[in-house]
Image (cartoon, rainbow, N blue to C red):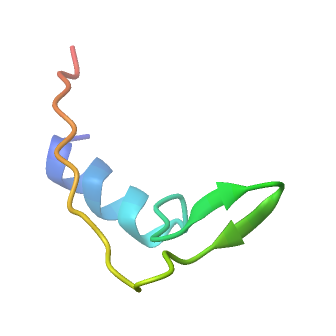
Amino acid sequence: MDAQSVTARLKNSGLFRTQGLIGGKWIDAYDGKTIKLLVIYTMN
């Protein structure tokens, strides 16, 4: 399986969230802003 297929499957799986887990509850930022994260990994 190539990296693009894995990425597409992860994006559709619900694993990525735009909220933070605080006190056991998923909470939006008070100002509604989000940041983009870059995760670098290799699949060998």
**Rendered view: 29 above or below 44:** below
As rendered, which of 27 and 12 lies closer to the eye?
A: 27
> Among all residues in the image, which is located at the extreme right?
24
Quadrant location of the N terminus?
A: top left
Residue shown at 17%/21% (left/top)? Answer: 42
Residue at figure coordinates x 50%, y 80% from the top left: 30
Residue 5: % across, % down: 24, 54
Q: Is residue 20 above or below residue 3?
A: below
Q: Residue furthest top?
A: 44
Q: What residue is rendered at 53% in x and 69% in y?
A: 19
- Which residue corresponds to the image point at 81% horizontal and 54% vertical from the top-left? 23
Q: Is residue 19 left or right of residue 37?
A: right
Camera-side residue: 9 or 17? 17
Image coordinates for residue 25, horizontal then vertical, percent: 79, 65
- The image quadrant where one finds the C terminus is top left
Residue found farthest to the bottom: 32
Q: Nearer the viewer, residue 19 or 10?
A: 19
Q: Please state which of residues 5 and 16 is positioned toward the viewer in this rendering.
A: 16
Vertical arrangement, residue 22 with respect to residue 27, above or below = above
Q: Quadrant of residue 2?
A: top left
Counting labels gives 0
Across and down, in percent, residue 38 comes to: 16, 45
The answer to which quarter of the image holds residue 8 is bottom left
9 left or right, relative to 4: right
